[in-house]
Amino acid sequence: MRARISDLKRWYVIGAPFLWLLVFFLIPFFIVFKLSLSDVATAIPPYTPTFSWSKGISAFISQLDFENYTFLFSDPLYINSYLSSLKIAFFSTILTLLVAYPMAYGMARAPKSWQPTLMMLVILPFWTSFLIRIYAWIAILKPEGFLSLFLIKLGLISEPLQIMNTTTAVYIGIVYSYLPFMILPLYASLEKINPSLLEAAQDLGSQPWRAFWQVTFPLSMPGVFAGCLLVFIPAVGEFVIPDLLGGSDTLMIGKTLWTEFFNNRDWPLASAVAVLLLLVLIIPIVLFQRQQEMEREAGR
Amino acid sequence: MVVATAPSQANAASSQRAGPRTAAPQTGFAPWKNPDLSPMVRFEGITKRFDDFVAVNNVTIDIYEKEFFALLGPSGCGKSTLLRMLAGFERPTEGRIIVAGQDITDMPPYERPVNMMFQSYALFPHMTVERNIGFGLKQEGMSKDKIEERVDEAMGMLELRQFAKRKPNQLSGGQQQRVALARAIAKKPRLVLLDEPLGALDKKLRQQAQFELMRIQETTGTTFIIVTHDQEEAMTVASRIAVMEKGLLQQVATPGDIYENPKTRYIAGFIGDVNVFEGTVSKVSEGCIEIDAADGYKFKTKSSESVTVGQKVGLALRPEKIRIGREKPNSDVNVIPGKVEDIGYLGSISHYHVRTAAGERITALRANAAHTVEQSITWEDAVWLDWPVDAGVVLTG
């Protein structure tokens, strides 16, 4: 009897997050998936459902087609959007890593009493709305913005820079916005490294730079991996940054999706784009989960 | 007054009988007595300050080739700082460090002809045992075949061959310790530094590991410098011991000398068990000092210590040098009565804790040989303690 009660309690504890995921993730996903299988229509809402309770499941299956998905492959716009998103996400992840690594390294090597403050500074931007911070970048990057004015004042350039509304601006925006997601896991793994390992490397004849590549960097790989996935996964589906900072030639799947949904009002096609985006991201998400699990096991 | 326990006592005594172990193969190994030899390592007036704290205070030590030299002291006495300065991880505030005639004070750690075995072992967790041991050789740019050969040699010496492909976290503490030692000797450095190398091992393993350290030191013929807070460990392995306290060097001597002739009360108490009687010098004659102790008892001891009549001194006596009996001995010096308060029976020997009339607590040792059984001493017995004139050591510091 007691065992059953404790079983029940355990199910309750595990059940709560499952219920949360079910209500706020799995059910919406199925709604989107169902939408992606329906046909577009001029109506409110703008589609005709392929499945209705009155006709039953057999009617649904007999009518089932994947025309929205096949359409995605017939128009190169969608494929190009996906590829371009992956490319932008990939290179901005690498750029973020290059910017974040020295910062995380500096934080991990800073005196212990400074570290909470430095951590605070990394998290500080989250206190302001993400949208406002992206708008601030418009003010910096636009041709008559702070950056160009500053560089002209310094005499380094004579013409305003054309960064705004280019892919460069998108890179800047992504690197800036996702930097904390890269710094924090990197810092966590760098901070764990026993400083006597570096002393041992030097003691055995390794110069500081070589000791870094042979000891510090390999030991920080879990942080590198976690940070890269934390940046790459959301960056692929990023919409706000390419929309506000990017130009018309900046092709990203998030933007395409938005256009389908709100400008073309083609909900079924937009849903198909969303489902496919999820499929594209499943591989890195699974990788991330596995890496987290391995970390947990190694920590035991 | 009494510090350590019985096994340490037995150990200290045994090492004293055998003399310094490193010297065993070539008796009379004492390069520090040879004025023609120049030292392998020379600490020259080394001072290290961290802000206001003086970690090491004007220390000068010469260490000779093939020595197994121990830096001994409680934690915070500066012994580790001294070792880290030799490895190059800390810079002395004052003074020079000379290794094999070369001033290495300003040399970075990766250029020094010195390898260290770290207290936490500091094994690279992402590398196999093999790669850990070969790390130093790889830095030298040695060829793969040569590295393999040298790694194999080191692994053979420490019986690690079957673990070659394992990662450090798949090894036991004792195995990790051996990997750390193998890594420190793989480059065949002129000098191996050991920072509390056995601190993480349990007592039994530690004793095995001590003998292993001595074996490796002898077979490789390398100079070893060990830092330890364990006096027993220092006594067992070292050819000479430097005792440090609060950044100051107290005494440098062989284990036997330190045990038999401690210079100060601190050293007497730190190395092994000791009883110290306080008294005043009453007479100084050739080679002998007489001391008036509390309650009118007179002590006489052979000593070359320069003291003056009236000076306050301590008389240190090792427990195993004190005889304990029920009959009053036929002597009027070095005799003191007391009452047995406690007996520690340890099988081969017993510890007798005796309270004297003056209230001092004295420890005496007695071997539990068969013939002593009938006149066994028990609790609350009135007893007499006595010792020969060559047993005590006069302490002025």
Image: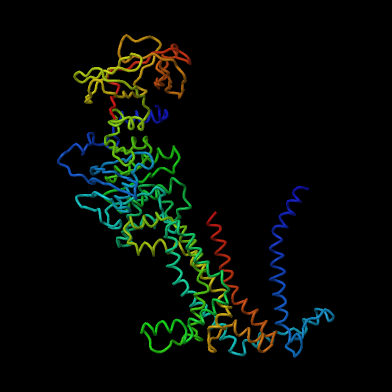
Q: Which residue lies furthest to the left in this view?
A: B36
Query: Please, is residue A225 above or below residue B340 in the view?
Result: below
Query: Residue B383: which quarter of the image?
Result: top left
Query: Please, is residue B339 above or below residue A14 in the view?
Result: above
Q: Nearer the viewer, residue B228 or B306?
A: B306
Image point (49%, 61%), residue name: A188
| Left or right of residue A61: residue A147 | left
| Left or right of residue A230: residue A64 | right
x and y, in percent, of residue B90 in the image = 32, 52
- Asked whether residue B42 is in view, the answer is no
| Left or right of residue A5: residue A220 | left
x and y, in percent, of residue B120 in the image = 42, 49
x and y, in percent, of residue B168 in the image = 45, 53
Query: Please, is residue B294 above or below residue B225 in the view?
Result: above
Q: Which residue lies furthest to the right in this view?
A: A54
Colour pattern: rainbow
Q: How many numbered tags mark residues here?
A: 0
Q: Nearer the viewer, residue B303 or B159?
A: B303
Query: Residue A261: which quarter of the image?
Result: bottom right
x and y, in percent, of residue B256 in the image = 29, 31
- Asked whether residue B34 is in view, the answer is yes
Q: Residue furthest front?
A: A153
Query: Please, is residue B197 above or below residue B383 in the view?
Result: below
Q: Quadrant of the C terminus of chain A?
A: bottom right
Query: Residue A230: which quarter of the image?
Result: bottom right
